[in-house]
Image (cartoon, coloured by chain):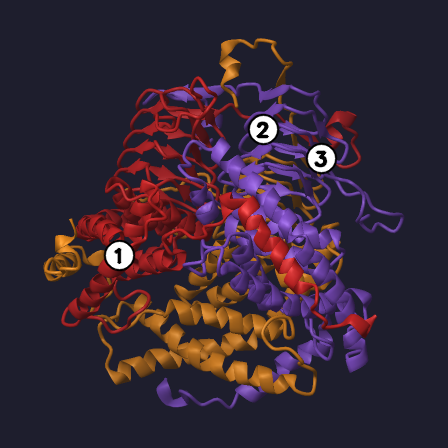
Chain colours: A purple, B orange, C red
Amino acid sequence: MASDFRLKERLPALTARIVSTYEQVPSINHLGHCPLPNYDVVIGVIEDLKEILYPGYRRREGLHLGNVTYHVGDLVDGLHDKLTTQFGRALRHRAGKSRDCDAESVEDFEALGQAKALDFLDRIPEVRKALAYDAQAAVDGDPAVKHVDEVIFCYPGFEAVTVYRLAHALYELDVPLIPRMMTEWAHSKTGIDIHPGATIGRHFFIDHGTGVVIGQTTEIGDRVKLYQGVTLGALSFPTDGDGNLIRDHKRHPTIEDGVVIYANATILGGTTVIGHDSVVGSNVWLTRSVAPRTTVLLEKPNLRMRAEHEELEPDYNYQI
Amino acid sequence: MASDFRLKERLPALTARIVSTYEQVPSINHLGHCPLPNYDVVIGVIEDLKEILYPGYRRREGLHLGNVTYHVGDLVDGLHDKLTTQFGRALRHRAGKSRDCDAESVEDFEALGQAKALDFLDRIPEVRKALAYDAQAAVDGDPAVKHVDEVIFCYPGFEAVTVYRLAHALYELDVPLIPRMMTEWAHSKTGIDIHPGATIGRHFFIDHGTGVVIGQTTEIGDRVKLYQGVTLGALSFPTDGDGNLIRDHKRHPTIEDGVVIYANATILGGTTVIGHDSVVGSNVWLTRSVAPRTTVLLEKPNLRMRAEHEELEPDYNYQI
Amino acid sequence: MASDFRLKERLPALTARIVSTYEQVPSINHLGHCPLPNYDVVIGVIEDLKEILYPGYRRREGLHLGNVTYHVGDLVDGLHDKLTTQFGRALRHRAGKSRDCDAESVEDFEALGQAKALDFLDRIPEVRKALAYDAQAAVDGDPAVKHVDEVIFCYPGFEAVTVYRLAHALYELDVPLIPRMMTEWAHSKTGIDIHPGATIGRHFFIDHGTGVVIGQTTEIGDRVKLYQGVTLGALSFPTDGDGNLIRDHKRHPTIEDGVVIYANATILGGTTVIGHDSVVGSNVWLTRSVAPRTTVLLEKPNLRMRAEHEELEPDYNYQI
């Protein structure tokens, strides 16, 4: 059996067979085009932005008001360069000019990317203020919190909202591709899937969070609280005359100020409005609007209790 | 208080106490055996395989048809060596020969590992074609997608299916242990838990995906679409005469071509068949078969609405 | 367009605007204080602890009873130092002495941290024995397992319980902040959110696991098994006279020995007790106690089946 061990004569033919699929099935490779945004750089950008938003928590110790300007200034300078390049690549990709990589063309897209990078960096103070409200919302909403520092260190809801607020700023600045890469990275880390196109007001808190889905055209007011497994989704996807999906209409719900939505509730549809200060109970499934200050509860399900040795009709025996 | 600071005289006794548990409780250590597959190498193999499947997206920029053969050939060569070693280790582990690490025995298992490594690499073109259909399924099924590149960059459903198709090829080649390590790594990144033993047809799409579970003996046809939280699971586990679980019979459902299953639906049981082109609604709980082209919906739950200040019977007050 | 490219004159003003928010919104920065626990060091500590608990699986190959003492002794020595420093920081943070960083004060908190570090290391043999039972529980409870090594390599439920048992030991030793950082790291990797304050008996298994939430004051007996999406949560949060949350009373359920809880069941409330050897079915929603040896099943939901071309009343058309 060991006689052919480590002989590699099959490898060149094998490689050639794989490479030949790049011409046969070109939809999932990116060969001979200008480069796409670089995933690792984009993720590094998120980490840099978090260091700017929450200095002293993660990367650098011993920061104080006397030295923090150097640290942050250096990060901002680096971010400017990375964002300029990555935004330029994303803009070129959307423009469909992905084969035209001569120096002049690169410069044009990078100049546009730079303008958007500066506009984005300009928004950081405002994003930071919004996130301070979100951190406070976690302290106000979770009896297990002892100190806001816990929230910043390790609350997945706060992590997801941090990345969402950054990505949403990019989405508003019409930067393609990159906002979604950022929120999907947060989804991977937290189980919370917030589309960068959603709009979310102040003082927002998601507790536990695994399984939360917030769709692209969702609108959420101020002081809203969600628990794990909540879906704010679409009912169905209308198609045009050719059967293609229509991609830009409002298809996700509106949640007004002060609403609380408990675990695993599902709210669907672009015309569904949950009125302000309403409460939606666990597991509720809603596809129509409710008035302000309403409590919506699932009627208590009928449970079957079976004591030991008691037989239930066979239909129930499998319901485990 | 600081008087005993940094004195470490307790550490040797502490270490000895820990080490003594390795003899008392040996089931969870691996001492004095031939090495197990290396987790980090296996994960690195997935990243290498993704670079071969989707060149130009992640690691290397500036690839074109003129240079991609060198890049891919180099990866294939390295993969051959890593897979040969890791498959050899996994095969030896299954054979229960984990203490017999002499050179000749290592060579025998590695030769078998090499044969499987070559067979696996041979399947990459076919896996790549299947994945091109899956990427297209995401574009066809999600109105938030603008371009297939988004899917490849950051769709968790596509990530999970990529790893599943690779792991399933290994499962079919009867490589132990490693396929499951691969799909659980994808589970960790995406929240989507697909057992490598499941069989899944062409043009498969999972949207959002967190909480999806697809069991070992599930069979899924072509053009199937799943949403977050869908479970394709087992009803109960029969045991043999001694009370031990029977481990290899079909215990998960069959989903025929063209079925759509909405969020958080649960379909259980090895004899349950969902007929082709059926639709299973959100939160539906199914343990019996349905005919082709059936729509299965949960009867709308009764909701209790409470306007502000209105009292509900006490039983309902807690349902939040 | 390219004329202003790469000019960075806006960056200093931009940086100054960001830095000015550190004084305006100081709640989410940590400037001019003694350092907080270091996140990366804490995560590294978990990896070191896993190497001690399960030697031979991940990092170091070729360990045997003749050399493992050196490997483990070296890890224990390093852990002693890291834990002493990190526990000292966490204790100082809780004491509110975060600006008093002179050498003497550092030494006092580190001395207290060292005492707790030694007490924690002392508990590892006991934690390791508990985890051997948990690994066996996975083998006993999942027909897809072939060998306990699979569980240790890649079962997310076992990963989450490993981190929980370590974090719970720290919680019992009254180490602040760090236990929660550890369990949230496991939550990020597994989708399983176990608060370090929960108490969990022997032979515990969580299968699949994504979406599981186990609250701070939950009590779980021996031989309990949970599936994905199970919530053991709170009903509502009582507030004191000033409207602030009361943070330390029992608000999560008690699950007695031998209970099995199937996927996506929700059990809420601090006075809810699930009697021993009971079974709670999928999707059940429970806020009251049940006697020992009871099976609790959801009454089978009414489903609406629609054959092709058959019309349902419009109300049902959207339920997808």
Q: Can you say whether B310 is above or below C316 in the image?
A: above
- Circle 2: is it few (<14), some (14-19), or many (20+) Cα within 10 Å? many
Mark 1 residue element: helix
Q: Which residue is mark 3?
A: A253
Quadrant in which residue C246 is drawn: top left
For disc 2, the marked residue is: A260
Question: Picture coordinates of residue B149 (x, y %)?
Answer: 70, 64
Q: Nearer the viewer, mark 2 or mark 1?
A: 1
Tag 1–tag 3 contact (CB < 8 Å): no
Mark 3, Cα crowd under 10 Å, few <14 / some 14-19 / many 20+, is many
Neighbours of disc 1 within 10 Å: few (<14), some (14-19), many (20+): few
Residue B3 position, x and y percent, is 12, 54
- Residue drawn at 73 percent across, 59 percent down: A175
Above or below B44: residue A138: above
Q: Label 2: chain?
A: A
Callout 1: residue from which chain?
C
- In depth, the one of A127 and B179 nearer the eye is A127
Picture quadrant where residue B95 is located: bottom left
The answer to whether the residue labelled 2 contacts the one labelled 3, judged by CB atoms less than 8 Å apart, is no
**Mark in the foreground, 1 or 3:** 1
Disc 1 from disc 3: Cα separation: 56 Å
Figure check: A305 above or below A26: above
**Does mark 1 fall on the same chain as mark 2?**
no
> In whole angstroms, how far apart are the C-alphas of marks 2 and 3?
14 Å
The nearer-to-camera label among 2 and 3 is 2
Q: Which residue is mark 1?
A: C103
| Same chain letter for marks 1 and 3 | no
Amino acid carrying mark 2 in the image:
Val
